[in-house]
Amino acid sequence: MTLERNTAIETLRELVESTLGGTNPQKKFIDNVVPEKILDLFPPQDVLRVAFEYGFIITKCSADNKLRANGCWIDPTEELAKRIETYDNISHGYCDGCCEKLLKEYSLN
Ligand SMILES: [Zn+2]
C-alpha cells in the first residue's frame, strides 16, 4: 500500500486526531496512539512532522541528533533538525550506531 504524499500526511493527522480523543499528546509517543504497523505505511519524516505538530514526545540521540520515528533512527531533514532545537518535549537516548560506539569504548577500558 502506498499513499500519495500530501494525502498521506493528512491521513496520518486524521488518525492521530481520532485516536487521541482529547488526551494529552505531551505525555505520549506517537506510536502509543497510532499502531506501529500503521505508522510503517508513512514516511518516517511525515511521522516526525505530525509528532511535532501535536506535541508528542520525540526521542533524540544524545550523541548525533538522529531522531526516532516508529522504531527506526533517522537523520532529520534540515527542517526537522531546526524544529527539534526549540522543541521542549524531548526524550534523550542513543541510536544503535552511537550505542555500539559507546559499548566499544567502555569495553576497551
Ligand atoms: Zn546516535
Image (cartoon, rainbow, N blue to C red):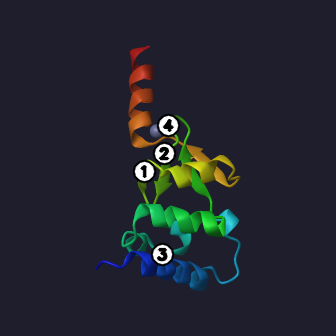
Left or right of 63, for residue 25: right
Mark 2 sits near ligand 1, with its Cβ under 8 Å away: yes
Spot occupied by residue 84 in the image (x, y as percentages of width and height): 61, 50
Q: Is residue 80 above or below residue 29?
A: above
Q: Which residue is drawn at 44% across and 81% down?
A: 7
- The residue carrying mark 1 is 74
CA–CA distance in space, label 2 to label 1: 5 Å
Mark 4 sits near ligand 1, with its Cβ under 8 Å away: yes
Q: Are marks 2 and 1 in contact (CB under 8 Å)?
A: yes
Q: How many labels does the image show?
A: 4
CA–CA distance in space, label 1 to label 3: 18 Å
Q: Do the residues labelled 2 and 4 touch (CB within 8 Å)?
A: yes
Counting other residues with Cα less than 10 Å from the Cα at mark 1, is it few (<14), some (14-19), or many (20 or more)? Answer: some
Residue 29 in view in this figure = no
Element carrying mark 1: strand
Which of the pair 85/25 is nearer the observer?
85
Counting other residues with Cα less than 10 Å from the Cα at mark 2, is it few (<14), some (14-19), or many (20 or more)? Answer: many
Q: Residue 64 carries which label?
A: 4
Q: Which amino acid does label 4 sit on?
A: Asp
- First in sequence: mark 2 vs mark 3: 3
- The residue carrying mark 3 is 9
CA–CA distance in space, label 2 to label 3: 21 Å
Spot occupied by residue 9 in the image (x, y as percentages of width and height): 48, 75
- First in sequence: mark 2 vs mark 1: 2
Q: Is residue 61 above or below residue 44?
A: above
Element carrying mark 3: helix
CA–CA distance in space, label 3 to label 4: 27 Å
Counting other residues with Cα less than 10 Å from the Cα at mark 4, is it few (<14), some (14-19), or many (20 or more)? Answer: few
Which of discs 3 and 4 lies nearer the camera? The answer is: 3
